[in-house]
Amino acid sequence: MRVPILNRLEALMPGEVLVADGATGTMLQDAGLPRGMPGEAWILERPEEIVALHRAYLDAGSKFILTSTFGATRARLKAAGLDAQVPEINLRAAELARQAAGENRYVGGDIGPSGELMPPLGPLTYEAAVEMFGEQADALAAGGVDCIYIETMSDLNEAKAAVEGALGAWDLPVFCTFSFDTHGRTSMGISPAQAAGAVAEMGVSAVGANCGHAPEELLEFLPVIRGAAPNAHLIAKPNAGVPRMVKRQAVYDAGPERMAGLARQYAELGAVIVGACCGSSPAHITAMAEAVREGAP
């Protein structure tokens, strides 16, 4: 039986990490997901593909996988006509990830940005955002996740609303990462120190950076995040480099070897959860897992 994820992180020796997974959208597209269809649609329609995706990363060395629910808020699913199925989609996604992970590896309930703008730029109120994120978190928790994992945040108010909504989900720990993709800040102008400090004050258990541009940029961000949130665990989950368009497809420039070297450096900076984001694959995770001293369950 696995120990609680926070206990596992606390037990890691210096330099050890819990290896996370990589990209999901591109993997599902490679498996046949039609262009323009949200990957969340396959949670109910093609659950075997979702389980296969998780198992590919687990086989590659992941000890911590995320549910395929990045876009499974009510706001995002509404565009696909799936908003009435928010609880069912998130619950089922958590069950599928748990099925793949078994009892010895960990599952994070993935929550991404809503796609809506908050005042003064848009109509999504803080209260409505808390309710929306809370709805998703509750369903993920009911499906058996080990933590709620909020990622790719750029608007600090939206991140805080997501954290507040998630903190009410079955007393699970909450992790939160931001995308610093605009001159060392989020697209909404939030610095790593601002972001980490704000959500740490709310009680998140882990904080860090994901997505972004060149993965080397995290070498600058991680010490700042750690300084702003010294009591929170540190997460590094960057893109596999910077994309360029080749025959209408985004091709990322960081291969497994480059990402492996960076994984080792992230661990040296204190990151205890290390994985990858856009453009990555199981091959990247295999290389990264081999490069770090894992804290295997």
Image (tube, rainbow, N blue to C red):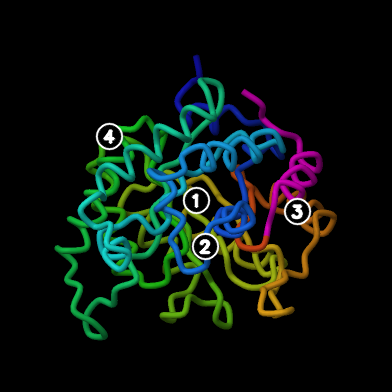
* Residue 41 x/y as whole percent: 40, 53
Q: Which residue is mark 1?
A: 230
Q: Could you tell me which residue is drawn at 40 percent across and 40 percent down?
A: 93
Q: Is residue 73 above or below residue 42?
A: below
Label pair 1/4, CB-CB below 8 angstroms = no
Q: Which residue is mark 4?
A: 171
Q: CA distance from mark 3 to mark 4?
A: 33 Å
| Nearer to us in this view, 81 or 275 | 81
Q: CA distance from mark 4 to mark 2?
A: 37 Å
Range drawn in magenta: 280-297
Q: Find residue 265 and name its label.
A: 3
Q: Find residue 34 and name its label.
A: 2
Label pair 3/4, CB-CB below 8 angstroms = no
* Residue 102 x/y as whole percent: 52, 23
Mark 2 or 3, nearer chain start: 2
Mark count:
4
